[in-house]
Image (tube, rainbow, N blue to C red):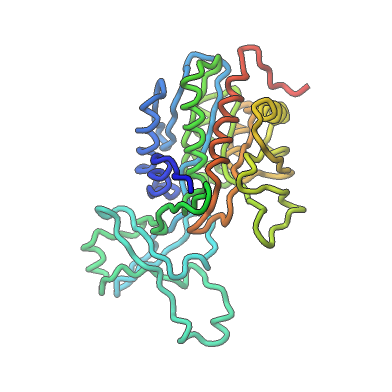
Amino acid sequence: MNDPPAFLARLLDAAGPSGFEVDVAGLWRAEAETFADSVTTDVSGNTLATVNPEGRPRVMLAGHIDEIGLQVTHIDEEGFLYVEGIGGWDPQVLVGQRVKILGSPGGLVGVVGKKPIHLQKVEERRKVSRIDQLWIDVGVGSRAEATELGLRVGDAMVIDAAMVSLAGDRIASRAIDNRIGAYVVLEALRLLSDASPVASAVAVATVQEEIGGGAGGGARSSAFGLEPDVALVVDVTFSTDVPDMEKKVLGEHRLGGGPVLSRGSAAHPVVFERLVEVAGAEGIPHTIQASPRSTRTDADSIYLTRSGVPTGLVSVPNRYMHSPNEVVSLSDLESTARLLAAFVTSLDGDTDFTPR
């Protein structure tokens, strides 16, 4: 069993749902400051770390740092909290979970409540749970007691589950999507800090991807301000090495199989081909994923920013996405960081991304 890097463990265990990323961004920023030439945070909450700021071309390496979560919409007279999802939840995975509520000193723990199966009618047992049928119990007996604990409408929360190491080099965490993207782009920047690239590399921990939708979240605003010449986005994709996955639609991607390179949609053809070439030269195993429509990642927000940004999407295979126990391979994180760093070092001032 391989132990994950301490920084990765801290990053995965920190709470940072979309719109509430301040604490986890602070961890990322502190790590970046140990080796980057400059580290800044913009008004949207995106954090940018740069190596070789005067170099060209300027490369944006983006990984969103937020995770899915819940937010309090109502506190009833008995002190039970009602919530709505921050990001895309399968409500079935929430039943019986513990949650950590942000905002209170040290974080307050609650449990997700639901009517016991013994008391459900037959037709109720057959129905899937909805988030609006669940509640959070923090142990109080009234709204006044909840208020005394500092609870307020609008408080955010995450599943209270720490990262764990599984067999081999695999880890499980509630925040794999996409805290590992923010981790990988920073690790790529760390490699570049020792490589003296001609290009300028800017790792960006973007915010609000899980709720960005058409608005683009923090990726759009950070790309607009940065004006990169090229961008690489790191996110997760579905690992299809588990039962009942439709490989005819999703392709074949497995844990330990290396990064997944997106082709089509927001993935620029010149960037894609260079990624394939670099992966081959570096001996980095990889697979290809077709993206005939949107990628549903930050790449969709970046590639149409300003007059257009040539963008590549590099994904890490991930099992059990949007659950409390997403699973990835540490070797895939390392391979993806190596690929990004090698891509950046392959560039020079004459590199042209115009399709011809």
Q: Can residue 210 be seen?
A: no
Where is residue 216 drawn, in percent x and y? 55, 41
Q: Is residue 323 above or below residue 141?
A: above
* Front one among 114 and 287: 287
Q: Quadrant of residue 335?
A: top right
Q: Quadrant of residue 90?
A: bottom right
Horizontal side of residue 309 vs 29, given as left or right? right
At 43% from the left and 50% from the top, the residue drawn is 17
Where is residue 119 drawn, in percent x and y? 46, 86
Q: Can residue 27 be seen?
A: yes
Looking at the rendering, in which quadrant would you find the C terminus?
Answer: top right
Horizontal side of residue 111 vs 355, given as left or right? left
Where is residue 261 drawn, in percent x and y? 67, 38
At 53% from the left and 29% from the top, the residue drawn is 224
Where is residue 249 drawn, in percent x and y? 74, 52
Q: How many marks?
A: 0
Q: Quadrant of residue 76?
A: bottom left
Q: Is residue 171 above or below residue 137?
A: above
* Front one among 23 and 83: 23
At 38% from the left and 61% from the top, the residue drawn is 99
Horizontal side of residue 35 vs 142, given as left or right? right
- Farthest-out residue, front: 1
